[in-house]
Amino acid sequence: MIERKKKLRLIQFTLLLIGFAVIIFTYTGTIKNSKEVIVPKETQEKIKKQASNKNNEDGDIFYNIEYTGLDLSGNRYVLKSKEAYSNKLSQEVVNMTSVEAFFYFKDNTILKLFSNKGVYNNKTLDMNFYNNVKAFYQNSELFSQKAEYSNSKGYLIVSGNVKVKDAKGTIVADELLFDIKKQTLDIQSFNDKINANINIK
């Protein structure tokens, strides 16, 4: 009987030691694995370098910004961007992505303009819109790759695959120049050919 108890205790002690060994090996293996680097050091260094270069060149980054003001003609505008960053070399220049602009004219009409990228000068109030530019004014739609609004000079230049759709017709051109002061529109084509379909009625 005593011999049997000794054997049982020996088996229990052995099982207890095996249990401790399993626990120790399991947790030390987990700690080792958690120290393993998922991203290689070279890639981490590249990311750090790119982030520091971006901060040095571009300055501060802002999200969901909005500028409001009046142009030289007294029209109110609202300029929005999902992401923007300032330029350290010239603080007045703000580079933007996912841009929306709303121009509220004195005759109670509204011009809505959207683009993938834009640049705003908060001193001159000049605005440039790039990549997939779309504008909507009353019943007209405009599509292009670039639009430059010069508040100081009073003009808007639209260029790059320009297409205007209106109830009166469609115009396709290389460049449109709106002189805001003179209230005139010049349509230019670099190959001396303008594709226009205008309904005079």
Image (spheres, rainbow, N blue to C red):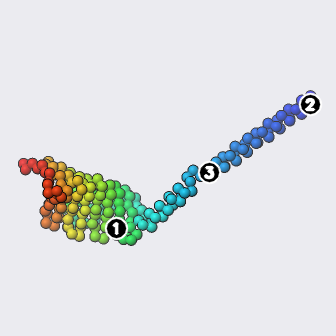
Instruction: State which mark lies toward you, 1 or 2.
Output: 1
Label 1 sits on what residue type? Val
- In the image, is residue 189 above or below residue 154? above
Circle 3 residue: 36
Are the two marked residues, 3 and 1, in contact with CB atoms closer than 8 angstroms?
Answer: no
Q: Secondary structure at mark 3?
A: loop
In this rendering, does residue 28 appear at all? yes
Q: CA distance from mark 2 to mark 3?
A: 50 Å
Q: CA distance from mark 3 to mark 1?
A: 44 Å
Give residue 189's position: percent from left, percent from top. 17, 57
Residue at 14% across / 63% down in the picture?
A: 183
CA neighbours of label 1 inside 10 A, class few (<14), some (14 to 19), many (20+)? many
Residue at 37% across / 70% down in the picture?
A: 91
Q: Quadrant of residue 26?
A: top right
Give residue 15's position: percent from left, percent from top. 79, 36
Dot label at residue 93: 1
Q: Quadrant of residue 131?
A: bottom left
CA neighbours of label 2 inside 10 A, class few (<14), some (14 to 19), many (20+)? few
Are the two marked residues, 1 and 2, in contact with CB atoms closer than 8 angstroms?
Answer: no
- In the image, is residue 73 above or below residue 175? below
Dot label at residue 122: none
Q: Quadrant of the N terminus?
A: top right
Are the two marked residues, 2 and 3, in contact with CB atoms closer than 8 angstroms?
Answer: no
Judged left or right of residue 189, residue 44 is right
CA neighbours of label 3 inside 10 A, class few (<14), some (14 to 19), many (20+)? few
Q: Residue furthest top?
A: 1
Residue at 21% across / 54% down in the picture?
A: 162
Label 3 sits on what residue type? Glu
Q: Secondary structure at mark 1?
A: strand
Dot label at residue 3: 2
Q: Earlier in the sequence, mark 1 or mark 2?
A: 2
Residue at 73% across / 41% down in the picture?
A: 22
